[in-house]
Every structure is written in C-alpha cells, then in structure tokens.
Image (cartoon, rainbow, N blue to C red):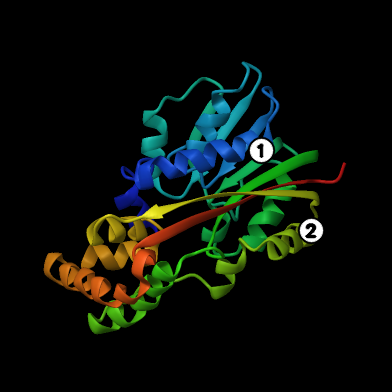
Amino acid sequence: MLAFYSRFSRQYDGWATGLNPKVAARLVDFTAPDPSAHVLDIGTGTGLVAHEILGRASADGLVIGIDISEAMLAVARSKGVPAHSRFMVMDGHELVFRKGMFDLVTLGQSLSYLIDPEEGLKETLRVLKPGGRVALSLQSRELITEAQELFFKSLGPLAQEHFINLPRHAESHARLANKPVLKLMLERAGFVDVQMTQLVTGGRGQTPREWTDLMAGLGPLPFTLMSVLGPRHRQAFEAYLVDVMTDLGDEAFRYHFNFLIATATKPA
C-alpha cells in the first residue's frame, strides 16, 4: 500500500485528467462545511479534500490532514500549509485526538483502504462532537463497463503467469461503495441521517497504453502489476487486450468511474 502511494503520489492529482480533484470538490460541495469548522481529513493523501476545505475556511477554522504515506503528505504540504492547518503521519484506526474535538471528519476515497473500516468509523465517531458529521467518498464498481470487467479478470492470470504476489484487500471492502451496505455500516457505527449522492464519469481509451495507464491508477493491485511487468511484457499484455476486446465493438476500451458520496451525523 505504502509503495503504491509513494510511487503514485506525484501522478495522483492529474490522473484521469484530474478526476481525483473533481471528486474531492464534489465531496466538499455536498458536505458544505461551516467556514469555522474544525475538520479532520483521514487518508488526506495529497490534501485534495483538506485544501478544498481550507479554501473555504475562515480564520477560526482548523483543518488537520492525516495519512500513513509521507510521500503523499509531502505533496499536500507543497501546496501550502496555512496557520490553521496541519498535515501529519497518523493511522486512521488509532487517532490521537481527544473525544469530541471535531465538527467534521472527512474520508475522501480512504475508507476502503483502512484494514478495518468499521474500527475506523468508530474512531471517527469518537472524535466528533455531538451533532458533528462524517463525509465520505468511495469508488464503486457497480457501473463498470464490459471492458473494465475484462481487464480486472485478466489481472489474476497475468500475475500468476509472472509469479507476482499482488496486494489485496478483503473482498468485503469492494462492497463498501454499495448504498445499502454503506448506510448499514454507518448506522451500525452509531451515525444517523445518512445522505448520499453519486458522481459518474466515463470515456474511452484512445490507445491500449492510455487504457492501461488509466486502469493502473485505480489502486495498488493494478498499479503494482503494470509497474513490475516491464516494457516487453506490458506490450504483450496490451496486445492481448486488443485481441480479446475485438468482440466488444464500440465498447472496447470504454470505462466508467463511479463515486458514491455520503454524509452522516453523530447524534446530539
């Protein structure tokens, strides 16, 4: 996980023509935090959500971004660290902050990367003030295309062929971006008033290399595999994709990126 974020940190904001900043902005728009709110951004990464909130915060506001990747935090800090903000290394499972310290806790595409998402939500609830909110964005596979299905199904055999052990999360993590599943998880953690929306975008890769670059940015598993294959093996894999996508016609190399965005409230 750390290797993925260390190597991808400089590409993260520009991946897929700036899709990650768009998701961060949509999350903050949907949440509409008070300018004076005290905010904790868990899994802040390059600080997309934190800086989006800082751009709307007053002098009374406070934004703290935490992450386990120093490389991602270095990018976040390079964008500026105003007096009312901090970026620090910390595990989302074990927050050092006191009970009821924050008005808002955000997890921009980070909940599914926690080893124990339920424990992470319990910690989130603990550090929120009564009436405080959590805001999350998660990438969903519910609307992926046939071409994306084909790509993901190819990763396992490709890894076995080259004796590569890929990093994997529990299968349950992939279901977090399902509306009923996320709502139930938030309610079990103690939250109420769950509100949700979605951001969906898509397109078509113009070349096999553009396609595999896009798919590699989806997480540690495809990124690791595309990174370690080497030029010759990657070209062979891309040639294989061209062949197997022939039957898809106009749907070949088409993709959808679907993000579930949600807020929930700690009871007063």
Q: Secondary structure at mark 2?
A: helix
- Looking at the image, the residue that sits furthest to the front is 249
Q: Residue at 62% across / 34% down in the picture? A: 29
> Horizontal placement of 236 versus 175: left or right?
left
Residue 254 vertical position relative to residue 31 in the rendered view, above or below: below
Report if the CB atoms under discs 1 and 2 are less than 8 Å apart.
Answer: no
Dot 1 lies on which element?
A: helix
- Residue at which label 2 appears: 187
| Position of residue 65 in the picture relative to residue 16 (left or right) | right
In the picture as drawn, the residue positioned furthest to the left comes out as 232
Looking at the picture, tell me which residue is in the foreground, 246 or 234: 246
Could you tell me which residue is drawn at 68 percent across and 32 percent down? 32
User: Given the image, on which type of amino acid does mark 2 rest?
Assistant: Glu
Between residue 222 and residue 6, name the one nearer to us.
222
Looking at the image, can residue 71 be seen?
no
Q: Identify the image quadrant of residue 74.
A: top left
Residue 148 seen: yes
Relative depth, front residue between 222 and 92:
222
Residue that protrudes farthest toward the right in the picture: 268
**What is the spatial separation of the Cα atoms under label 1 and label 2, in whole angstroms?**
20 Å
The mark lying in front, picked from 1 and 2, is 1
Which residue appears at 60% of the width and 40% of the height?
27
Which of the 4 image quadrants contains residue 53?
Answer: top right
Q: For this view, does 213 lie left or right of residue 45?
A: left
Query: Residue 83: x percent and y percent?
Result: 52, 20
Residue that mark 1 sits on: 30
Residue at (31%, 42%) from the top-left corner?
10
The disc at residue 110 is: none
Where residue 198 sits: x, y (%)? Answer: 62, 50
**Residue 49 percent across, percent down from the top left:** 53, 37
